[in-house]
Image: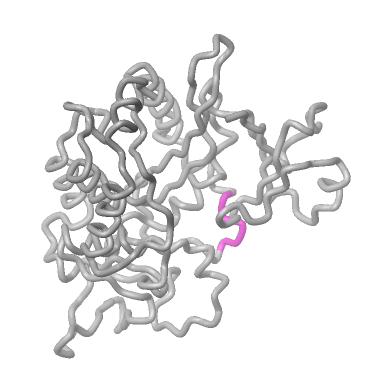
């Protein structure tokens, strides 16, 4: 991090200021997030920012290839999970990097995983506002590396998620949204965009029309779905009563379309040949295991929060797999 900014922040930090930030956050929506809030922002120097942007450009160049859908068609391990009316491109792409050192000892980002799915866009905007309110941050510092202002960032989200649609006909869709760890992001999205937060059990279907009942019991036709459901998790939840299933064709616009989660999240990792991405292989397409197998992790395509990942990989573990087509072998990264 930038040493002078780190030092200046540490000198002004007090537990009382941090608690005031937490109290402010908890009171914003009368809700306390279940995860720990960092005591400090991270101050990234321009040199590392430029490497991050270069890494994103290299990875996005692959995702934007005209044959990307063809390259990722095997991501759908079950053809019945294909959702109709797929968009031409993913509306959202989230890249997760680890901070490593290159051969010269300089910081370099390394891709850990990526998602064709939205992240905590609204919460991060709320949190930086609270940091600025309760602490003195360096002039000119921003969470938007491309020079976008906060107002432009919010307007971009509004134009992509709501567009020209009446906000009450745009729903943020989740399974039991109030019980999700990311609920504060949903509340912030509702506050900024005026959209409706719905559990999938609240959706009603008539023909190809989706609707919900508002507070007065009136039907509201849904035009857009801001999707926050991980479809492969929902696919396994046979216990959830619902009128609508993702694989049914309905007259709505997905923001973003569920198929892109399958195409991009984890399945795409072996497609990147970059200094910013670890070596990664589709296990079923690998003719010979790496000799330094101890330097790799074994990852199921569709694990959630790291479940099923094998850190200490052996040939015996791989030999015991029933279906190699469901796994990636990915080079370990030294943070």
- Residue 279 falls left or right of residue 195: right
Q: Residue furthest toward the bottom?
A: 217
The foreground one among 130 and 162 is: 130
The foreground one among 182 and 134 is: 134
Q: Residue furthest toward the right?
A: 316
- Magenta span covers which residues? 75-79
The quarter holding residue 84 reads: bottom left
Q: Residue at x 77, y 42 (%)?
A: 312
Magenta span includes 80:
no
The quarter holding residue 55 reads: top left
- Residue 115 falls left or right of residue 285: left
Instruction: Locate residue 244, reporting x and y percent.
Output: 39, 78
What sort of colour scheme is used for the picture? one colour
Instruction: Locate residue 58, reporting x and y percent.
Output: 43, 25
Q: Residue at x 20, y 35 (%)?
A: 136
- Residue 58 falls left or right of residue 6: right
User: Does 253 sit above or below residue 88?
Assistant: below
Residue 138 visible in the picture: yes
> Which quadrant of the figure contains the N terminus?
top left
Residue 84 visible in the picture: no
Q: Residue at x 34, y 25 (%)?
A: 7
The foreground one among 222 and 19 is: 19
Q: Main secondary structure of the magenta part?
A: loop
Q: Residue at x 30, y 74 (%)?
A: 198
Instruction: Locate residue 308, reporting x and y percent.
Output: 68, 55
> Which quadrant of the figure contains the C terminus?
top right
The foreground one among 187 and 16 is: 16
User: Does 279 sit above or below residue 118?
Assistant: above
User: Does 120 sit above or below residue 103?
Assistant: below
């Amino acid at each position: 991090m930038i040493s002078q900014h780190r030092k200046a922040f540490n000198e002004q930090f007090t537990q009382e200021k941090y608690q005031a930030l937490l109290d402010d956050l908890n009171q914003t929506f009368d809700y306390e997030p279940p995860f720990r809030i960092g005591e400090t922002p991270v101050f990234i120097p321009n040199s590392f920012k430029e490497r991050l942007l270069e890494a994103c450009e290299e990875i996005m160049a692959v995702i934007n290839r005209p044959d990307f859908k063809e390259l990722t068609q095997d991501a759908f391990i079950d053809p019945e999970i294909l959702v109709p009316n797929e968009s031409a491109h993913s509306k959202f792409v989230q890249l997760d990097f680890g901070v490593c050192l290159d051969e010269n000892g300089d910081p370099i980002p390394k891709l850990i995983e990526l998602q064709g799915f939205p992240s905590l866009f609204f919460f991060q905007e709320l949190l930086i506002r609270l940091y600025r309110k309760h602490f003195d941050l360096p002039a000119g510092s921003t969470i938007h590396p491309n020079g976008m202002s906060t107002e432009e960032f919010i307007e971009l989200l509004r134009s992509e998620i709501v567009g020209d649609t009446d906000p009450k006909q745009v729903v943020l869709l989740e399974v039991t949204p109030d019980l999700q760890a990311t609920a504060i992001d949903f509340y912030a999205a509702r506050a900024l965009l005026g959209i409706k937060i719905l559990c999938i059990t609240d959706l009603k279907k008539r023909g190809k029309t989706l609707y919900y009942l508002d507070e007065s019991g009136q039907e509201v036709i849904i035009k857009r779905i801001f999707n926050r459901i991980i479809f492969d998790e929902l696919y396994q939840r046979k216990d959830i009563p619902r009128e609508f299933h993702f694989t049914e064709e309905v007259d709505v616009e997905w923001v973003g379309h569920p198929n892109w989660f399958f195409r991009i999240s984890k399945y795409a990792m072996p497609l990147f040949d970059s200094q910013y991405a670890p070596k990664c292989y589709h296990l079923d397409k690998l003719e010979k295991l790496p000799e330094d197998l101890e330097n790799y992790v074994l990852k199921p395509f569709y694990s959630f929060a790291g479940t099923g990942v094998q850190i200490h990989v052996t040939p015996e573990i791989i030999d015991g797999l029933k279906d190699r087509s469901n796994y990636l072998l990915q080079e370990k990264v030294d943070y």
